[in-house]
Image (cartoon, rainbow, N blue to C red):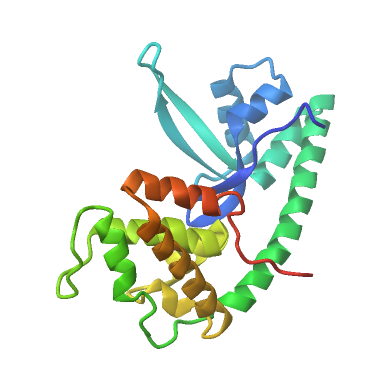
Amino acid sequence: MENMMIEVKNELIGKELVQAVNARDLWAKLESKQQFSDWIKKRIADYGFIEGIDFTRFHKKMMANNATMTEYIIALDMAKELAMMEKTEQGRIARRYFIECEKQLHSSNRHIDAIRSLLLLDAPATWVKLFNDDFYIAIMQLYGHEFDKTKNKPFYCAAITRRWIYDIVLPPELNFEIDTKRGEERKHTWFTQDNGRQTLLIQISKVEMIARMSESRADFESNCARAFLSSPLQLSIKN
């Protein structure tokens, strides 16, 4: 099934983060004789797929002729049905490919459930200070700014915290889950008091150290990428 190789990734359809594919990619692999727009519209109409549940769409402007093209992102279940509807060998191969993707997803979900139970709470705990002043001093120095605890922190502090702390210690699904559930609470209050906060504190310390070692913002981003992106999930869970 190597020649199938349709990218499956997390996408927001409605209010749910689900495994999904680009419908145009599937259409190309199925080798349909119909034009893509006719093919997808007919199947949506004939089989009652629902926008916001089964698929979402967006418009993309083409650089060559400035025309607008409509793209469809479809949930994995819809992709399996579309593949099965073709009643061709390519359709059968695609369906088996998506079933294999689902098996891998279920294995990944077990891993994510283990991380959730270890690091995250079902409801936020009482606020405690995790990000100390030294962290913000180190970050703001990269921008040529001085930290003043009486003033609101610049927006880039939140962006760095998200990218190099929360996105590193949690997989995307759990980041999305917390962001969806939380209201005005600080994100770190959703972490367990032992493993969760300890994991955060370790990552905060690493990022602060890299900030102090870096000569510029670009140097900081490069150093963080080398340190963390080779293994985005820092926590290892043994089955």
Which residue is at 55% across, 63% downward?
170
**Near-viewer residue (82 or 202):** 202
Which residue is at 55% across, 45% downward?
50
Estimate the x, y position of residue 182 in percent, counting from the top left.
Answer: 41, 72
81 left or right, relative to 234: right
- Furthest residue toward left: 150
Q: Quadrant of residue 7?
A: top right
| Vertical relation: 157 (above or below) 118 | above
The quarter of the picture where the C terminus appears is: bottom right
27 left or right, relative to 197: right
Estimate the x, y position of residue 176 in percent, counting from the top left.
Answer: 49, 61
**Near-viewer residue (169 or 63):** 169
Which residue is at 80% across, 26% downward?
90
| Vertical relation: 35 (above or below) 1 | above
Estimate the x, y position of residue 225 in percent, counting from the top left.
Answer: 49, 48
**Near-viewer residue (149 or 27):** 149
Q: Quadrant of residue 115?
A: bottom right
Which residue is at 71% across, 19% downward?
31
Q: Quadrant of residue 44?
A: top right
Is residue 3 at all visible to an observer of this figure?
yes
Estimate the x, y position of residue 24 in percent, counting from the top left.
Answer: 59, 27
- Furthest residue toward top: 65
**Near-viewer residue (118 or 63):** 118
The quarter of the picture where the N terminus appears is: top right
Is residue 88 at all visible to an observer of this figure?
no
- Furthest residue toward bottom: 126
63 left or right, relative to 169: left
